[in-house]
Structures are given as structure tokens and as C-alpha cells.
Amino acid sequence: MRKAGKPKLVRDARIEAVQLLGRWTRIAQGHVLIGGGCSCGITAASLRIEEFEQQIMDFLKSKHDVAAKSASVAELLRAIATQGASVDPGRALAVLADLDRTLESFDQLHRTR
Ligand SMILES: [Zn+2]
């Protein structure tokens, strides 16, 4: 039996990593702490994007071996995107899922009306 021709239902961690990298880049550029507020318009912000990133990395490193060697979110995502073969897909997707949830909560926090 040949496996060719079967539809691929497997998620590709490399593609998702690239998509998340784009999203992270937009967040990092769009939310700069100025005075007592954020550049996106909310005034209750108290977290610099650098501090937020450190929190993300601490969280990911505590849960995922895959993240242990990366110093930043962008570095982690690039590592997954470019070294897809050396990263276990299941583990990579688990990291991406956690990161996605974290960015989602940041988005909600900073959503202006
Ligand atoms: Zn913001």
C-alpha cells in the first residue's frame, strides 16, 4: 500500500510558527508603553513588551524543552520554522498552542473599543 495521495490532515508546525511570528511582530511593534499607557490606546497598561516577552519565555521554558534554548519569542519561532525536522512536531505544536493562547489574552487585554 502506498501512502501517497492521502490528504494531509497533519498540522505543520513550521507554517504555524511563521504565522505566530508575524502576529508576535505586530504585537511587539503595536504596543509600546508610553507614560502610563500603551500606544494602542489603553491607559491601564503597565507591562512593557520586553517584560511581557520575558514572562512568555519563562512560562514556555518551564513547560517545554523545545523552548529551553531560545532567548526570545522570535528566536523560538524561527527555530521551529527553520528546523522543523529536528523539533518533534507534537512538541512544537504544543509550544505554539501555549504561545497562541498567551498572545490571545494579550490581544484581549489591549483591545480598544
Ligand atoms: Zn497595547
Image (cartoon, rainbow, N blue to C red):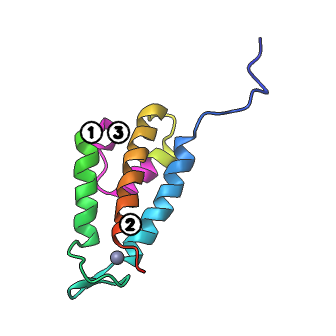
Q: Is residue 31 left or right of residue 84?
A: left
The three-letter amino acid code for the residue at tag 1 is: Lys
Q: Up-down: is 2 above or below 32?
A: above
Nearest the viewer among 113 and 31 is: 113
Which residue position holds label 1? 63
Q: Residue drawn 20% across and 85% down?
A: 36
| Disc 2, SS | helix
Ligand 1: quadrant of the figure: bottom left
Residue 67: in magenta span:
yes
| Disc 3, SS | helix
Highlighted range, magenta: 64-79
Dot 2: few (<14), some (14–19), or many (≥20) neighbours within 10 Å? few
Which of the labelled discs sits on residue 108, or is there none? Answer: 2
Dot 3: few (<14), some (14–19), or many (≥20) neighbours within 10 Å? some
Farthest residue, direction front: 113
The three-letter amino acid code for the residue at tag 3 is: Val
Q: Position of residue 75 (x, y in %)?
A: 38, 55
- Quadrant (top left/top right/bottom left/bottom right) for the N terminus: top right
